Amino acid sequence: MLDLLKSSVAALALMAGGAAAQDAITLGMVLEPPNLDPTGGAAAAIDEVVYANLFEGLTRFGPDGSILPALASSWDVEEDGRVYVFHLRDGVTFHDGAEFTAEDVVFTLDRARAEDSTNAQKVLFEGIESVEAVDPLTVRVTLTAPDGNFPFKMAWGDAVMVDEASVADLATKPVGTGPFKFDEWAQGDRVELSAFDGYWGEKPALKRATFRFISDPTAAFAAMMAGDIDAFPNFPTLETLPQLQADPRFKVIVGTTEGETILAMNNAQPPLDDVRIRQAIAHAINRQDIIDGAMFGYGTPIGSHFAPHHPDYVDQTAKSAHDPEAAKALLEEAGADQVKLRLALPPTPYARRGGEIVAAQLREVGIETEITNMEWAQWLESVFKGGDFDLTVISHTEPLDIDIYARPDYYFHYAKPEFVALMDELQAATDPEQRSALYVKAQEMIADDYVNAFLFQLARAGVANAKIEGLWENAPTQANDLTGVRWVE
């Protein structure tokens, strides 16, 4: 009888544990964010944890890439796109109980555009002339020039709203207005969130969310198979997807991203300041071999810095088609004998695997590389911030970010005056047809200048428990939005 009682208690405990699991989720991520402040860091991993979960902006990206209201329920456009009046939602509070008002918008946008701002996308705010709190729920933003793209800019993770009282600790103790609040960051292992009871909008079905950081692809696969991870939205072991797809416990989710994967080149220093050398490198690259070898066939070849799913995309791949003989001729014309370049590789599997293939392809045309495998923080500091590199393989996952080529201090150092002028014209344009034509010109210019070797558009290939619904299929921005995620039977 005692054994039967023990068995019954154990069974009830298991049932209770199973029920509890239906309002919690554990997501896997390859990279751990260097901090948790999306307004003060460039790493995509920050937004992958906090975007739409912890922090919200005036607007936000929907799962289809559309721009939706967020903390602003609506906005008016005045003076032909030079003035935006945002109408804020009533009753919004930060996780620490502070009220969200127009003054927080003024503080956030002024902080982001300040001279000493550390915002990684400071360019988003450069067109702002003034920000005024008309009343507690109304904000008037005046721009220096018309900008039809301003609601899009306000949807970025770098433009989320913050409170002056808690801003000093955002990196390690983030406080936002989102449906989840921060609980714990066990560095090197996980970040834990829980549902925010005071959330202004529709409450999420999930009560708890854990983001676990698993950099080793083999360990990621093992964790998925063991059930330690419920979903891995950007799964690192693509070669195992057929096996997981055949397992009824899982579903494989394949979509697109905004991630242009490039072999970035330092245009500011020799020999890469010579367009012939850059063109030779571009012709030495066999994109399909890299997609097959590093991504197991997942990825779309690109010839410029633009997503193929965007309506203004123009295929530029023919300009840098794989042609080793053309590459050798260009090197000879440039008088470049015995070229040796440093190739810095961040820890992502696409970079490590792709970098080895790139090195082999360059060797075939006479270019030797010295590979340095870097951890993420080291890559951000040395390559992205310090510009101390020759070549690197990286995915730029920010949406519609071709404007980075106009930034003079950006790590690959292009900023051709004609391109800067083109971006200035695009900034002021509000007519959709004019903007489309300018995007086409921009793609063509950087392709013709061989600024970088453009490899492929990163696929979003994820794995999830078959009972989970609501995860994004595509990635219009770098996010793991949990607001619509739920377990189903």
Image (cartoon, helix red, strand yellow):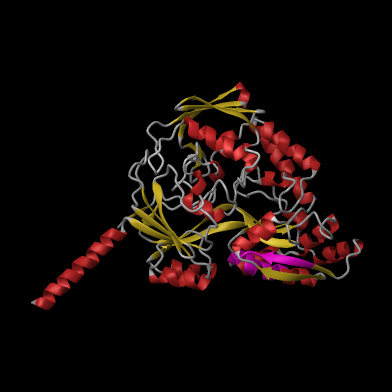
Q: Is residue 18 visible?
A: yes
Residue at 69% across / 59% down in the picture?
383
User: Where in the figure is residue 453, as x and y percent of width and height?
Assistant: 73, 58
Q: The N terminus lies in which quarter of the figure?
A: bottom left
Between 433 and 343, the one nearer to me in the picture: 343
Residue at 48% across / 30% down in the picture?
102
User: Where in the figure is residue 90, as x and y percent of width and height?
Assistant: 39, 31
How many marks can you see?
Answer: 0
User: Where in the figure is residue 195, as x and y percent of width and height?
Assistant: 35, 49
Residue lying at the far top in this picture: please name it: 79
State left or right for residue 47 relative to residue 96.
Answer: right
Q: The C terminus lies in which quarter of the figure?
A: bottom left
**Please, is residue 410 above or below residue 9 in the view?**
above
State left or right for residue 339 relative to residue 1.
Answer: right
- Membership of 408 in magenta stretch: no
Residue at 84% across / 63% down in the picture?
326
Quarter location, residue 318 = bottom right
Q: Is residue 456 visible?
A: no
- Membership of 345 in magenta stretch: yes
State left or right for residue 336 relative to residue 197.
Answer: right
User: Where in the figure is residue 432, as x and y percent of width and height?
Assistant: 64, 33
Between 111 and 276, the one nearer to me in the picture: 111
Residue range (magenta): 341-358
Between 98 and 130, the one nearer to me in the picture: 98
